[in-house]
Image: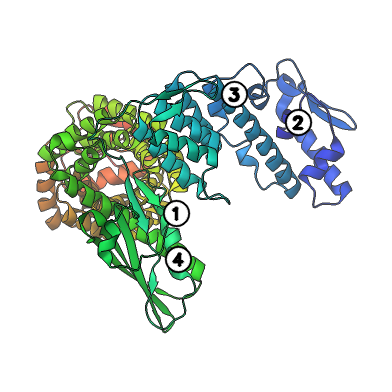
Amino acid sequence: MAYLAMVSPKPVLRATLASLLWSRRENEQARASLRQSVHELQDTLGPAWGHLFVADRHHLSLRGDSLDVDAHMLAQPGGSSIEILARFEDILLEDLNGLDPAFDRWLDEERGRFLRIGRALGEGLMAECNDPVVAIETAEQLLVIDRRHEGAWRTIIRAHAERGDADAAMVSYDRCRGTLAETPNGRPSIETEELIDRVRARIVPVRPLESPVALPIPPPKRERTTLRLRVMPLRTIGEEADDGLGVGLAEEISACLSRFRWISCLPTKLWPTESIGGFGEPGVEADLIIDGTIQRGLGRVRVIARLLDMRTGGEIVWAGRFDREMTDPLGLQDELGATIVAQVDPELMQHEGRRSAGARSHELTAQDLLLQALPAMYRLERNSFLTARRLLERSIQADPASSVAHGWMAYWNLLYVGQGWADDPDVTTAEAARFAERAVMLDPGDARALTLAGHVRGFLGRHPHEANALHDRAIALNPNLAIAWCFSGLAHSYLGQHDEALRRITIALRLSPSDPHGFFYDGALIMPHLLRGDFANAVEAGRRAIEINPLFSSAYKGYLSALGLMGRQRETGGMLRRLMTLEPGFSVHQAIMRSPLTRPEDVIQYAEGLRRAGLRENAGPVDDVSQRLTICHPAIDLVPGAPHSR
């Protein structure tokens, strides 16, 4: 049907369809399979739709005035708009992979043609844009279709420059360079480099056929919005021959770091021969440097990596030791690169937050304000949490185009509801959704913004399928982002896929074992363990989460449920008192109403554990509680004290 729709209204030879769908069978067997399929299809369509499906002895076709094919309409001239362009980000016939090798080849050709149409549409829309804001939005949408489209990158850089925001133009250039590093050429074209040189010189053409205009010079105090970081080749210690592992590992770390929006990763270069004091010279413009050593022996390899702050004379910000079996060098390079980068990201965020804390208020950049807000959020102490809100607001005010700041603001609102602090949870939830949508719109390629938005949709919006789509996209963009793996695991748990949830959350813990958000990762393990019936591991995960951050109220809830289901009443009293101190009004009723779990049996088990732990029912009208569970399954009754076997 898909094939006939794509070529409609033209008829197709039966022999062509048989060879596409049953290419590995003999001709007669393939034709028999086709005849059987046509017969079943005619029965399925019935008289209401059968007239569109035309079958004769030699041909099949889809015809009729009432037949509309969306792929055809998207490709029609005169219908150009950014909304239509957005449709091209969907994969054509995504669910039809693997039916037959011949059909797969046809699919690849059609998808390539479909994307070429989308690119042409995007290029035409960009050429018509006179408003820089619309040009940026259009180009970003084109990059969702083809992230390596250098013309779209140049449009974004030029549009930011026309708006007088040279820093945003430079950030876009860094994003472009990081993306193009994955291509065979590996670097921007001469045309792009010439454009960025004009931006640096404050002169950029408004449009290709118009005269250049001078850009307004920004205030002298304005700083870069990204950190410049360079990875040096790791040095081999000992008599082992250097097989290139040090250089290869440095390149892998650079490639992984370039996926983080707030880091501008400079090309790897060899160490200078002079002492460490020489790294502050103009020739090395990095703010920070990653270096390290490699040692080998008895089939094992030891890598020691360090993060140095060159702005303070080479201060060691972080260091890590990694021991591995020396088997496949390329596999080792990939695994070590991912592990090092996942640990550097949170350590660097903490360091920059501490560093900016001593700066005068008027000297703080948007990024400084954001980095100061994050530790205050993680502590979950109410006063500092409210301070974090004000810092995030100032960061967004200083840089309204920051997708990351909007994403963290959405997450702040989510935690505000989760901690039970929101006076009006519905209003706060709506605000979280607005910030999340804005974050994704500002930068559809920002993995951190995507996963933060996904968690808002999954936890507050109770749309875990939509959340998983955003998390998977974030992981594809940056597979070393630990928080994306954790949030993705939670979304799977909401859907009842608890084994997969545990696998993903465990990846987050392995990627970033010392993450300041680590209490959240341990807390995320509680519910999948609990709902699999592994109460002992749920209790252990809860204990770890509370030990790291005793103010994280969500950890107490799953922990208490597991203790209750295990019958460990002597331990529940103290935990219950601590939860009531954090959330005085919390009850079984609230637990049910707030829960993002979609399977009724999961909600019932969670609530029953809380009852056995001694949490008060306080359910209000019975109908309210029943309504929450009836959404999942109309046959479920939940009445306090009643059996829950149904």
Residue situated in front as seen by the camera: 67 or 148:
148
For disc 3, the marked residue is 124
Query: Who comes first in sequence, dot 2 or dot 1?
Result: 2
For disc 2, the marked residue is 4
Secondary structure of the residue carrying tag 1 is helix
Front of the two marks 4 and 1:
4
Query: Are the residues flagged by discs 2 and 4 in contact, CB closer than 8 Å?
Result: no
Disc 2 residue crowd, few under 14, some 14–19, many 20+, Cα 10 Å? some
Tell me which amino acid carries mark 4: Val
Secondary structure of the residue carrying tag 2 is helix
Q: Who's the residue at 63% across and 36% down the image?
A: 93
Query: Are the residues flagged by discs 4 and 3 in contact, CB closer than 8 Å?
Result: no
Query: Are the residues flagged by discs 4 and 1 in contact, CB closer than 8 Å?
Result: no
Which quarter of the figure has residue 356?
Answer: top left
Query: Who comes first in sequence, dot 2 or dot 4?
Result: 2
Residue 317: x, y in percent? 23, 59
- Which of the image's four quarters has the C terminus? top left
Front of the two marks 2 and 1:
1
For disc 1, the marked residue is 255
